[in-house]
Amino acid sequence: MSDVGVVMPVYKQKPSYLREALQSILAQRYRHFTLVIVVDGAPFDVLPIIRETVQDDPRVRVVILPENQGVAKALNRGFQELFSLPGIEYLTWISSDNIYSPDFLLTLRTYLRAAPPEVGVVYSCFQEIDEAGKPLRDEAFLDARRKYQQRRKEELLDFHFIGVSFMYKAAYARLIGGYGQEPVEDYDYFLRLTEHCEVRYIPSVLMEYRVNSPLSISAQMKRSKEQHRRWRYMFQLVKQQARMRRGIPPEMTVLFPVTDGTARTVESYENLLEQYYSNYQVIVLDQTPQKQATRVLQSISDPRVGFFHVPGGARTAMHAMLKQIRTPFVLFFANGPPMGYYTLHSMAQTLRAAENQRILAAFLPANGSGVQLRDHPAPFEPVFFHLYRTSRLLEAWQNP
């Protein structure tokens, strides 16, 4: 009897990639699995490739959806099929363009089965390959990836470290409902799942992940700015929802006064939204007469952002707003050279770790020598791009 359930959603896919993915699963050393292939409104030539490859393998079930419903609904349909079977204890899902090690299922199942009952997810390292199947990462890179992935589950809110090679217990999966929130359905799922169980990491490379596969969702994101913005919005939304479920309030408020809706302002705004650190709320202070900046920036949606019209001047508005801020940290943002991806993270981490509670602000000096701290007010506060301890700034900032 099978105790491992595997779902493969298939929509559009290059035939050779689909064959390789299917063959790598059918050749698994652990043979007691059921594979549910969900044909999600795929083109007419996909089903014959599947039939030809799996032939009459009794471990395979094919579910056909006449119209494309998206990966989340396809996954839910596949897992619905598996939940109806007796004996399924472990679950995973796979993509139709990756290649899986013969030990993929065996290793993940063995670790999960041997782990304490509270462990519900195991995940492993993986290798990236190009369109031709050539490995893209050397051992030094993989070692760095292993260090990145070896994290506490609480860090999942900051690092999407589980990646693409994983298995989880069906008992925990039954507690949380199915997949949703495309195109970040996997990240959202693991955020919800790990609220009920612990995780364990396996450093072995158990799969080959095909990057830049022409029909993959990730490739579509890279080709389209609008698709990337949609992905970013959903990525931040599921983080925000997870923090709300866990009672974690925002740590930082970013005040961003704007005087126009030009491309330069848009570029600075997007640079802020792309920051690796995400536990902040943004207040855009629109100084344009007819809210022109608001109309431009609101077209770039983000769940962390609010807009206020302040035609009377930014400094007075910032001072009034500061008195209402309840986050521990506050940053004053402006148009300027783009920040590095980890700038907010580095400053927040440094200020958070400062033992001296009288420290006023953290900042990156112009020479790029690393985050520095200051405990004395500057001649004119606030200084843009300095991250302040809110309570200290309220003490140091004189009334305008």
Image (cartoon, grey):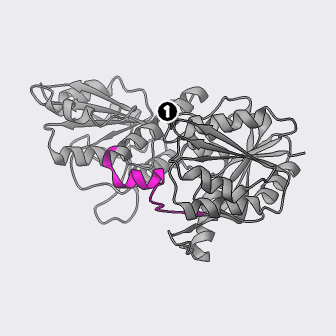
- Along the line of sight, the residue nearer the viewer: 346 or 73: 73
Snapshot quadrant of residue 180: top right
- Whether residue 39 sits left or right of residue 326 in the image: it is right
Could you tell me which residue is drawn at 83 percent across and 41 percent down? 89
Q: Is residue 273 visible?
A: no
The amino acid type, in three-letter code, at marker 1 is Gln
User: Quadrant location of residue 125?
Assistant: bottom right
In x, y percent, where is residue 258?
18, 37
- Count neighbours of disc 1 (C-alpha within 10 A) and say few if under 14, some if 14 to 19, many if 20 or more: many
Quadrant the N terminus occupies: top right
User: Does 230 appear in magenta?
Assistant: no
Tell me the magenta residue range.
209-226
Which of the pair 347/296 is nearer the observer?
Answer: 296
Would you say 264 lies left or right of 142 here?
A: left
Q: Residue 195: x, y in percent?
A: 68, 34
Q: Residue furthest left?
A: 289
Q: Is residue 222 magenta?
A: yes
When the figure is inspected, residue 30 is found, relative to residue 396, above or below; the finding is below
Q: Is residue 261 left or right of residue 373?
A: left
Residue at which label 1 appears:
240
Q: Position of residue 226 (x, y in %)?
A: 32, 44
Give me the residue at 18% from left, 31% from top. Answer: 314
Front-most of 50 and 183?
A: 50
Q: Residue visible at 28% across and 55% down?
A: 338
Q: Is residue 301 visible?
A: yes
> Image quadrant for the C terminus?
top left
> Which residue lies most toward the right here?
1
Residue 149: x %, y % from top left: 63, 57
Vertical placement of residue 112 versus 394, above or below: below
Residue drawn where x is 45% and y is 46% of the image: 277
